[in-house]
Image (spheres, rainbow, N blue to C red):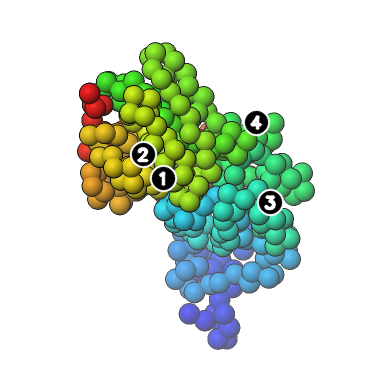
Amino acid sequence: MAGPGGNAPTQHDVARALGISVSAVSLALNDRSGVSEDLRARVRQTAADLGYRPNTSAVALRTRRSRTIGLLIRNLSNPFFLDVIEGFETVCAGSGYALITASSHYDLRRETELMRTFIARGVDALALAPVGGSRAAGEWHRTTGRPTVLLNAARLGRALPVMRTHVDGVAAVEQAVGHLADLGHRRLALLSAPRRRSPDPERADTFLRVVAERRLSGRILETELTAAAAGPTLDAELARPRRSRATAVITNSDHLAHVVYAAAAGQGLRIPDDLSVVGHDDLPTSALLAPPLTTLAVDRRTIGVTAAGLLLDALADRPTATRDVSLPATLLVRGSTAPPPR
């Protein structure tokens, strides 16, 4: 719908339609404090009805903001992150922000390069699923001072003024080990990233603590968290003599649990008769495996929604109840876990 004289609608047209000031329209459309949520919603709806579109170049010059947010993840081949991105993008779009997404592919150098690209592009905030350590987040903060949220990195960057949204990794591992121990397993393995590259070392620490408390044998299988790297690591474990190899493997993702299935088949082992497997994420394909995968279900989309909300609140100077949001994981018992072989 055109404004007066056939021109594109402006904020003045939105203000005139609602009988409010242009400044109130500007506050609402730019997600700033100073207007009620009810008025903000009415302004956005009226703007949409009139066909108003902001002049992004003018907005960037006036506010020194690009209305873009950078999302830098670890591994686009893991379907886990697709749901995170979908939730993140939905929230950004609803607030008039564009999303730029990139993947580091578990490469520390690439992570740094992409973060610097985001700085050069002038993105207003950064969401980062780090490869390991908080170097990139630290450089981002020192260089820009702009809002940062870390995804699934509960312990990293404690000295930095960053926000976090993550799954409760401690409770997840406790549930997985407890389930396997209750089935009678005594030799467990955890597939984990090398500590220097791990974004969530609390999982490995929790695993070692819980197996010690339950007087079990626990082994951490350190590997880069890609299918190509994890396969040989699992082959070496499953090729051990029967009395020394793990009778159950816990992974940090369903994506890698699929690799455990393949490695077991390659060694002539049956799941769950010879080997039990516990995943993490509850991907849509996990219930379709043969046998269906026992896993820890997490609301992947909510991770993205929550992270985007934290950044948008920070950009709008809105107070938040917490800067560290921990989301639960729920154990779903399916056919991939059973008592160990006798």
CA separation, marks 3 and 4? Answer: 22 Å
Disc 1 secondary structure class: helix
**Residue behind mark 3:** 109
Q: Quadrant of residue 272?
A: top left
> Who is closer to the viewer here, 250 or 33?
250
Residue 29 badge: none
- Amino acid carrying label 3: it is Arg
Coordinates of residue 207 in the picture (x, y in percent): 45, 25
- Amino acid carrying label 1: it is Leu
Task: Compare marks 4 and 1 and give the one earlier in the sequence.
Answer: 4
> Who is closer to the viewer here, 199 or 243?
243
**Residue behind mark 4:** 158
Task: Compare marks 2 and 4 and give the one earlier in the sequence.
Answer: 4
> Who is closer to the viewer here, 321 or 140?
140
CA separation, marks 3 and 1? Answer: 24 Å
CA separation, marks 3 and 2? Answer: 29 Å
Asked whether the residues under the numbered discs 1 and 2 touch, taking CB atoms below 8 Å apart as contact, a structural biologist would say: yes
- Amino acid carrying label 2: it is Gly
Coordinates of residue 224 in the picture (x, y in percent): 53, 44
Residue occupying the point 74% across, 49% down: 144
Within 10 Å of the Cα at label 1, are there few (<14), some (14-19), or many (20+) other Cα atoms? many
Coordinates of residue 138 in the picture (x, y in percent): 71, 41
CA separation, marks 2 and 4? Answer: 28 Å
**Residue behind mark 2:** 279
